[in-house]
């Protein structure tokens, strides 16, 4: 009896539930409407005519003998705790 009741309840819930369909949008926002309109070319904080090229050098001085930053004995790699 209890299994029949549970089965009927589950079937009733499945029959009366309807899928929620979302409309396609160009963007989302936490509050209000999105800032950028459909078809925008660049974000407001980006310079589309920024000079290209250049050089990036990332380096660290020193040596290490472990990648574990919590070691007691030895030297951890520079920048592992950052």
Image (cartoon, rainbow, N blue to C red):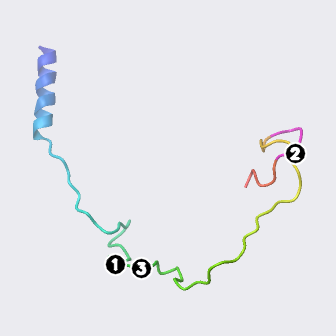
| Rendered location of residue 35, percent (x, y) | 38, 76
Secondary-structure class at tag 1: loop
Left or right, residue 27 beside residue 54 = left
Residue that badge 3 annotates: 41
The span from disc 1 to disc 3 (Cα, nearest Å) is 10 Å
The magenta region covers: 71-76
* Residue picked out by circle 1: 37
User: Is 49 part of what is drawn in magenta?
Assistant: no
Mark 3, secondary structure of its residue: loop
Pointer 2: residues within 10 angstroms few (<14), some, or many (20+)? Answer: some
At x 78% / y 43%, what residue is drawn?
Answer: 67
Which numbered dot is residue 55? none
Residue pointed to by mark 2: 75
The answer to whether the residues at label 1 and label 3 have Cβ atoms under 8 Å apart is no
Q: Depth check: 6 or 60 in front?
A: 60
Q: Residue furthest top?
A: 1
Residue drawn 32% across and 69% down? 26
**17 w.r.t. 27: above or below:** above
Provide residue 47's location: percent of width, then percent of height.
Answer: 54, 83
């Amino acid at each position: 009896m209890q299994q029949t009741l549970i089965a009927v309840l589950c079937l009733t819930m499945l029959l009366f539930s309807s899928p929620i369909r979302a409309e396609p949008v160009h963007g989302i926002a936490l509050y209000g409407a999105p800032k950028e309109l459909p078809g925008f070319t660049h974000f407001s904080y980006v310079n589309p005519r920024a000079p290209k090229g250049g050089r990036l050098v990332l380096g660290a001085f020193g040596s290490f003998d472990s990648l574990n930053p919590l070691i007691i004995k030895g030297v951890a790699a520079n920048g592992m705790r950052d």
